[in-house]
Amino acid sequence: MAERTFQSTEELALRIRRHAVEMTHLGNSSHVGACLSMADIVAVLYGSVLQFDPSRPQSPDRDRFVLSKGHAGAGIYAALAECGFMPVEKLKTHYQDGSDLSGHVSHKGIPGVELSTGSLGHGLGVGCGMAYGAKLDGETWRTYVLLSDGECDEGSNWESILFAGHHRLDNLTAVVDYNKIQSLAPVRETLELEPFADKWRDFGWAVVESDGHDHDALKAAFSAGPDGRPKVVVAHTTKGKGVSFMEGQVLWHYRSPQGDEYEAALRALGARP
């Protein structure tokens, strides 16, 4: 089993970003912007919040993490590799013929992945089931679900939000990667979410808004509570964070970095092309 290779959550986030750029380049795959926007959230979760043992990925007392925005699977694979769930070298097989590291995150044969996702709106419902089951069984582990903002267009999410508030699932934390850009346009032009935080509160959730790239702010957001209610961390982020020509650009939802763009992206992240 591989070993943890980072010294801080900031270092882990940088490594996730470098891996995501390289993986999407090698696989000629998409969603690099979504991986970069959530890198700090994922780094804080895996580096300082989630309780797990990579040598025992199915340990019954582990915290559960579900990536509901499954299209950003490269970012989770990168975090898992850096945390020791699999060799870092395996990341180079992402999206290659015969590889089990599919573009949308898959749990098949990948230790540390709880659920395959891709079609949006599924992760939070499963997370509710995990949290509700843990309460019924008297378990103390927690469930975390990371959603995209565009994904909150899905009605299934709002059914889950209603369910969690009704059952006061205070062992459940949802995190929204609120980068305000979805696949083809800004979120506000596709289906406006605001007043977003108020909607969660009205459904019985504790809401913490945070800078999604500030590690201290994220750690404080995750440590708050529980107060008898499920919690959502609305993390304000920038699509493509870390690579200036990708930041805030709809183009980089689907585009993969190739040629000069690939080399420029790696240099922006302090890596050698």
Image (cartoon, grey):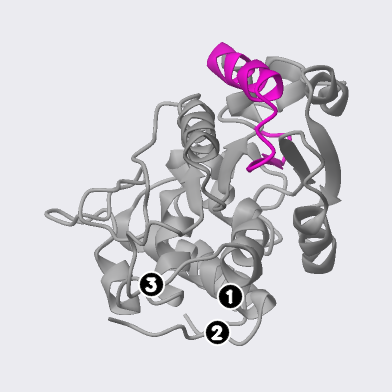
Measured as percent of width and height from the top left, residue 114 is found at: 37, 47
Horizontal side of residue 251 vs 219, given as left or right: left
Q: Is residue 239 visible?
A: yes
Give the percent coordinates (x, y) of residue 6. 55, 84
In the image, what residue occupies the spot 74% across and 49% down? 238
Q: Amino acid at mark 3?
A: Pro
User: Mark 1, residues whose alpha carbon is within 10 Å: few (<14), some, or many (≥20)?
Assistant: many
Other residues around mark 2 within 10 Å, as few (<14) / some (14–19) / many (≥20): some
Tell me the amino acid under the disc marked 2.
Phe
Instruction: Establish if 231 lies above or below 190.
Output: below
Q: Where does the magenta region start and end?
A: 155-181
Q: Nearer the viewer, mark 3 or mark 1?
A: 3
Q: Is residue 14 left or right of residue 259?
A: right
Foreground of the two, 179 or 55: 55
Q: Residue at the location (65% across, 70% down)?
A: 48
Q: Residue beneath label 1, please?
A: 12
Helix, strand or loop status at disc 1: helix
Q: Which mark is residue 54?
A: 3
Crowdedness of circle 3 by 10 Å Cα count: few (<14), some, many (20+)?
A: many
Judge whether residue 29 is colored magenta. no
**Residue 217, horizontal then vertical, whole percent:** 85, 61
Q: Secondary structure at mark 2?
A: loop
Is 180 in the magenta?
A: yes
Quickly name the residue at label 2. Answer: 6
**Are the residues flagged by discs 2 and 1 in contact, CB closer than 8 Å?**
yes
- Looking at this rendering, what residue extends furthest in the front direction? 138
Mark 3 or 2, nearer chain start:
2
Quarter occupied by the N terminus: bottom left
Please tell me which of labels 3 and 1 falls first in the chain.
1
Q: Who's the residue at 84% across and 17% down the image?
A: 202
